[in-house]
Structure formats: structure tokens, C-alpha cells
Image (cartoon, helix red, strand yellow):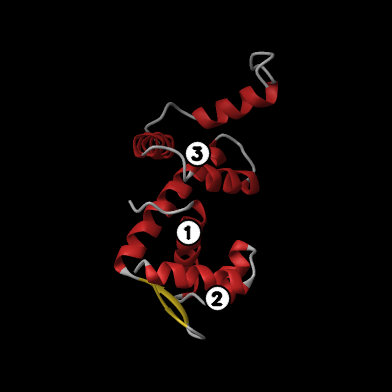
Amino acid sequence: MYSLSRKAEDYLEAILNVILEKGYARTKDVAGLLEVSPSSVVEMFRKLDAMHLVDYRKYEGVTLTEKGRAVAEVIKFRHDTLKRLFLLLGVSETVADGDACLMEHELSEESIRQIRLFVDFLDSGDAPADITGAFAAFCRAGTGRKGND
């Protein structure tokens, strides 16, 4: 993968998410998703365009190049994998999304791959009956070891 800043990766992922939702990405859409100013978005669009990861056209928005889409899809895969894990663990949607965003940049490919396999296993029906329900009951009962909170 490219050596990109976390910020640049977040923009690529946001562009992909907007494109998947609307079919196109405009400055205001990406700004709204990332909660940044339109001028910040334009600045990053220009940087990503110079790196040949997007095609930026003033007043028209941005599209991902083939290379840009490949990078964005890897980042989205990492984010979605971590968010699914956190949701299975009973973390709220908002916290799961935020924590996934933080961790997607830091974990190794091996860890992400194994987490994805574990999450897929839990969702497959091949896992022991109601393992996630048993875990939720364990959490509600407060039977975890004391002193590790």
C-alpha cells in the first residue's frame, strides 16, 4: 500500500463511501462526512490528484483513479472489519465506528486478516451456538475478572 498519512487515508475512504452512496463525490459531501471545511477538502483533493489517486475537477468533484480506488477499498475493508468486531463485542455503533477509524491505520495486515476470519466465523453459523449471546450475558452479569477494567 502507499505510504499515506492517516488524514489522506481517511479522505480516500470518505470519497469511496460517498461514491458508493451517491455514485459521485463532491466537495461538500466529503466535507460533511469528515466534518471539515470545504477548503480543507479541496486542498486534500489537490494533493491526492497530484499523487494520481483521484481525478479532481474544480466545481465537478472528484473520482478515484484505479490506484486510488484500490487503496480506498483496503482502508474500507480494514475499517469495516474492525467495526464488525466491536459491534459483535457489544460496543455501541458510534464508539465502534470511531475506534475502527483509529485502529484501521495501525494494525498489521496479518492482524486484520485474522480478525476478519474470526468475525466471519462468528457470523457463519459454524461457531458454537450463540457464542455472542453467551458473551453478552457474561458481560451483563459482570463476571469478568476484577481489576482489569
* Residue type (three-letter) at the residue carrying disc 2: Thr
- Where is residue 30? Give x, y as percent: 55, 69
Q: Residue at x 47, y 48 (%)?
A: 79
**Distance between the Cα atoms at labels 3 and 1?**
24 Å
Query: Is residue 19 in view?
Result: no
**Distance between the Cα atoms at labels 2 and 3?**
31 Å
- Where is residue 85? Give x, y as percent: 50, 38
- Where is residue 75? Give x, y as percent: 42, 52
For label 2, the residue is 27
**Left or right: where 148 falls relative to 105:** right
Q: Residue at x 53, y 45 (%)?
A: 100
**Distance between the Cα atoms at labels 2 and 1?**
15 Å
Instruction: Say which mark, if any, is on residue 85.
Output: 3
Q: Please tell me whether mark 1 sits on a helix, a strand or a loop.
A: helix
Find residue 52 and report its image quarter. bottom left
Q: Please tell me whether mark 2 sits on a helix, a strand or a loop.
A: helix
Instruction: Say which mark, if any, is on residue 8.
Output: 1
Q: Residue furthest top?
A: 146
Q: Residue at x 60, y 36 (%)?
A: 90
Find residue 141 and report its image quarter. top right
* 2 vs 1, front mark: 1
Find residue 49 and report its image quarter. bottom left
Name which of mark 2 and mark 1 comes first in the sequence. Answer: 1
* Residue type (three-letter) at the residue carrying disc 3: Leu
Name which of mark 3 and mark 1 comes first in the sequence. Answer: 1
